[in-house]
Image (spheres, grey):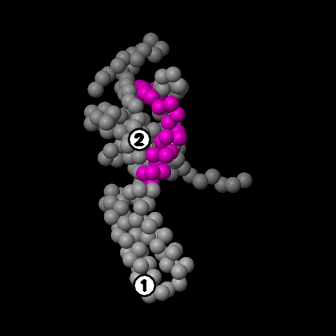
Amino acid sequence: MRIVPVVRRRTIILAMRITFTPTIEEFVAAQRAHAWRKYKARTASLQRVLQPVLGITLLVFALLMYRDGANSALILIEAMCGVYFLLAVNVIAPFLYRRHFRRTRGLGGEIILTVTDDSLTLDCPGRSAGTLEWRAILGVLDRSGVTLLYLSPGSFLYLSRRVLDDERRTELLAMCKSKGIPFTYPNLPKQKRA
């Protein structure tokens, strides 16, 4: 880990600087972690196994109904549901995530994240730069392949294990804990309509 001194207002604050270029695989892992955020690991893995089994079962029933001469509309609906259940987790969702990555990444390139005691600074050389105060982070979700820092229930910063080794990960999580950031998905209270 590289500790870089950052000078601000005549004080020296130790900072963690992470430089990385996001990949499609990391983006897909982050989106998958976000999509499965409310499930425990066992429940998520059970659903990932049962969903294709349900899809195959629906396709087999559609085939048996076809052989028995059942209503063609019912057979078509059952077959379409079977194909969806079979392909949703492993084919359709990753395809949509990859397409979203290509559409939102713009020019791509390197990202420099500097974490200090005061804030997080994102710098995309040649494109943009921004600073987030710690109170902007509403929650942290730490999964096996990725750590998500939530800015709102639908938007997050993601750091994969490729760029966030165990030592940096421990330091980042300790800093989040010291700032009082909950280690859960941010559930904001619903506002009453006027």
First in residue order: circle 2 vs circle 1: 2
- In the rendered image, residue 70, in percent from the top left (x then y), is placed at 49, 86
Q: Which residue is mark 1?
A: 67
User: Who is closer to the viewer here, 154 or 71?
Assistant: 71
Q: Residue furthest top?
A: 10
Is 174 placed left or right of 182 in the picture?
left
Q: Residue furthest right?
A: 194
Amino acid type of the residue tagged 1 in the rendering: Arg
Q: Residue furthest bottom?
A: 68
Tell me the magenta residue range: 93-122
Can the viewer see residue 194?
yes
Amino acid type of the residue tagged 2 in the rendering: Ile
- In the rendered image, residue 59, in percent from the top left (x then y), is placed at 41, 74
Q: Secondary structure at mark 2?
A: helix
User: Who is closer to the viewer here, 69 or 77?
Assistant: 69
Q: Is residue 111 magenta?
A: yes
Q: Nearer the viewer, mark 2 or mark 1?
A: 1
Residue 24 numbered tag: 2
Q: Is residue 67 shown above or below 151?
A: below
The structure residue drawn at horizontal position 50% and vertical position 51%, both measured from the top left corner, is 187
- In the rendered image, residue 141, in percent from the top left (x then y), is placed at 40, 46
The structure residue drawn at horizontal position 38% and vertical position 46%, both measured from the top left corner, is 29
Alpha carbon of mark 2 to alpha carbon of mark 1: how far? 43 Å
User: Who is closer to the viewer here, 1 or 186?
Assistant: 1
The structure residue drawn at horizontal position 50% and vertical position 30%, both measured from the top left corner, is 107
Residue 33 numbered tag: none
